[in-house]
Image: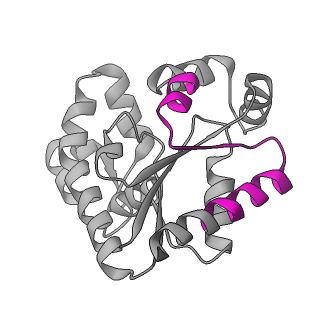
Amino acid sequence: MTHLLGLTGSIGMGKSTTAQMFRDAGVPVWDADATVHDLYATGGAAVALIGAVWPQAVVDNAVSRDILKQIIANKPATLHKIEYIVHPLVAASRRAFIAAHDDPLLVFDIPLLFETSADKWLTSVLVVTAPPDLQKLRVMARPGMTDAQFAAILSRQTPDAEKRARADYLIETRTLDGTRAAVQDLIADLKGQTDA
């Protein structure tokens, strides 16, 4: 039976880097953010559906995330309507990914894993974490990031302490080598469980 491992962590905790380490080790990874990006891109399944409700959000046959953000900022309740359209499409992509792979371990990179109750269908959850000062250093190094934006992003995410408390597995991402070694150990452990 395939082990479905959820991967999450707050902004700046090293989730994307950790996901790439799983890929580098040959583990298939489904990426929730990349899926939404594809749905919004030219020809994406969400373009016509979003455009039917918010035509101003479609530019050059693709959904403009910047315009959607402005719409949400002006009317926060809009977010729930967008989620109502997009979440079923994301779920369909995830089901297709699972159906397409016959591997002992699959990883699901989901930034808002607990916020969307994804832990209910996953076998287990891995949370990546780092000390707050290192987290802030990483986030503030991103182009255009401000303290206000960082605070706003954190306010929408389950706090790191709660994520850690709800995790089945934890990896602290202080160094690349340490993180890579922890990923390799976890892969060996989880694949060993599916072989048993």
Q: Residue at x 61, y 59 (%)?
A: 19
Q: Is residue 57 above or below residue 31?
A: above
Asked if the stretch drawn in magenta spans residue 177, the answer is yes
Q: Residue at x 40, y 33 (%)?
A: 69
In this rendered view, identify the residue nearer to me: 134 or 50. 134
Position of the N terminus, as image quadrant, is bottom left
Q: Is residue 8 above or below residue 78?
A: below
In this rendered view, identify the residue nearer to me: 169 or 196. 196
Q: Is residue 150 above or below residue 119?
A: above
The image quarter in which residue 59 lies: bottom left
The image quarter in which residue 99 lies: bottom left
Q: Main secondary structure of the magenta part?
A: helix
In this rendered view, identify the residue nearer to me: 53 or 18. 18
The image quarter in which residue 90 lies: bottom left
Q: Position of residue 169 (x, y in %)?
A: 57, 45
Q: Position of residue 192 (x, y in %)?
A: 55, 71
The tally of labels here is 0
Q: Residue furthest front?
A: 196
Regarding residue 110, the answer to whether it shows in the image is yes
The magenta-colored residue range is: 160-187
Asked if the stretch drawn in magenta spans residue 90, the answer is no
Locate residue 8 relative to residue 133 in the image: left or right.
left
Q: Residue at x 42, y 65 (%)?
A: 3
Q: Is residue 185 above or below residue 72?
A: below
Colour option used: one colour
Q: Residue at x 15, y 43 (%)?
A: 53
Regarding residue 46, the answer to whether it shows in the image is no
Q: Position of residue 101 (x, y in %)?
A: 39, 80
In this rendered view, identify the residue nearer to me: 138 or 176. 176
Locate residue 183 relative to residue 181 in the image: left or right.
left
Q: Position of residue 194 (x, y in %)?
A: 45, 71
